[in-house]
Amino acid sequence: MKHQRYGNLLVQAALIDGKWIGAATGNTIAVMNPATREAIGTVPDMSRAETRSAIEAAERAFGPWKRKTHAERGALLEAWHRLMIENLEDLAQLLTLEQGKPLDEARGEIRYGASFVKWFAEEARRIGGHTIPSPTADRRIVVLKEPVGVCGIITPWNFPNAMITRKVAPALAAGCTVVIKPSEFTPYSAIALGLLAERAGIPSGVVNIVTGMPTEIGNELLQNETVRKISFTGSTRVGSILMRGAADSVKRLSLELGGNAPFIVFDDADLDAAVEGAIVSKFRNGGQTCVCANRILAQAGIYDVFAEKLSARVNTMTVGDGTQPGVSIGPMINEAAVVKINRHLEDAFAKGAKATTKGHVLPPGTQYVAPVVLTGATTQMQLASEETFGPVAPLFRFETEEEAIAIANGTPFGLAAYFYTESLKRAWRVGEALEFGMVGLNTGLISTEVAPFGGVKQSGLGREGAQVGIEEYLEMKTFHIGGL
Ligand code: ADP
């Protein structure tokens, strides 16, 4: 079929214990190109029993993998990183094919995804421990860091590459083995990563990939006592199901869940910089990221000018198939996403919002949505309390700093927030008052492998990336040595 394309990285099989296999039942699920709604191919629809065999393979691989030296694990991760960079173009093409984002953004995601592999390849050698002065002369106390064990990795469709590497790279660096369940919408990017891991020489069973529908695979990952940790990125709804399911066997959890990011523009902001920041933060991946600005708050003094400048900028954007040059907004991931965006728009218009953008020409197809700026947004609208996950930029008007902070924090979510001001005092005041895990001051970009990524409140538990990212996959063992 299309195997020879995409650098032979498009593989329609799951990876268990170093073997590329189909489901025992022969069942498959179709994977669609969101730009055309044509089937790209299929992947195996794996069962619970097959998930169990992947967990058992990961368990068998765990001992030898954890006994490798940190430098050996680091070197294998370096090799994996090198292959990702060498295959960047094919990985990006594959990503756009199944996910829809513009090719340039897909290339950016592969670089971002690869950066976690590089970072944790380096961090592998810096897993230390510490000693504690003993309370008695005949004892010594040493704290060792050990890998958690077999990890279940459950990832979403919006970053089919980077959400995997951000979890799997620190897991492997720490000495854990993994069973990955990628999103059923975007399994090929995950499979391609598995193939490159194999080519890099990472031993069989260290990385397993189980494709299929969520519940069967998810339930086995949750209920199987061999799995010691679940790391998940996705919706808060599913995150809380996983948290409940992980309770019975008291698994460790890392959860990176939904957000409802405010983007505040104060009267004293550099408006041109704020417009560029809003474009990056709001429209990246067509608005389908958990750190996308969901509510743009503009102060009364600059509200109209900001709306005008932002609308003019949005009018220059082009909607289309992500493989076409010059496209800034690709298709949405599926029709359900389009239905939700339209529901938010209809509700906003019914409650008095006005579109200030031109009404873009859309290509044929059912999954395209025009980017739009809305003025007159209010907190009564659905888009104020739910993540729209689409290219909709609602502008809320506020008068005072206190009011902006109250609106911004008036959500059960706490992932990312952004604000623009030229005042140093306000910068500190607002930065400290925002109840979010990540705050961007005069920038719309907060994602980098070197800084902790994660949320507070219902946006999740734990942090990914940075030096702390590896701790999520390590346990402390306190070693008391007596009778000296
Ligand atoms: P999104 O809103 O980004 O689509 P979801 O939370 O629905 O995110 O899905 C994220 C990931 O969680 C996907 O891989 C999906 O298949 C998986 N998932 C969804 N429901 C469950 C479940 N009950 N158990 C385990 N995984 C699930």
Image (cartoon, grey):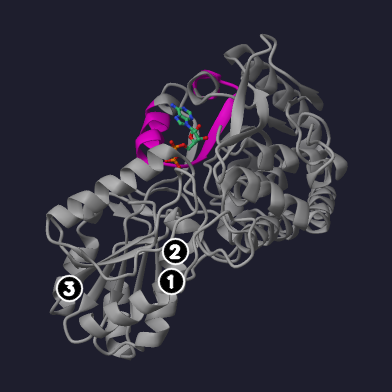
Magenta part of the protein: which range?
219-244
- Mark sitting on residue 283: 2
Q: Where's the C terminus, which quadrant? A: top right
- Kind of residue indicated by mark 3: Arg
* 92 on left or right of 241: right
* Whether label 2 touches label 3, CB < 8 Å: no
Q: Earlier in the sequence, mark 2 or mark 3?
A: 2
Could you say where residue 128 lies in the image, as x and y percent from the top left? Answer: 68, 55
Circle 2: is it few (<14), some (14-19), or many (20+) Cα within 10 Å? many
Q: Earlier in the sequence, mark 1 or mark 3?
A: 1
Figure check: 87 above or below 450: above
- Kind of residue indicated by mark 2: Phe
Instruction: Look at 77% across and 29% down and name the residue there.
Output: 205
- Kind of residue indicated by mark 1: Ile
State the residue position of label 1.
279
State the residue position of label 3.
397
Q: Quadrant of residue 13?
A: top right
Residue 166 seen in this snapshot: yes
Cβ(mark 1) to ligand 1 < 8 Å?
Answer: no
Q: Where's the N terminus, which quadrant? A: top right
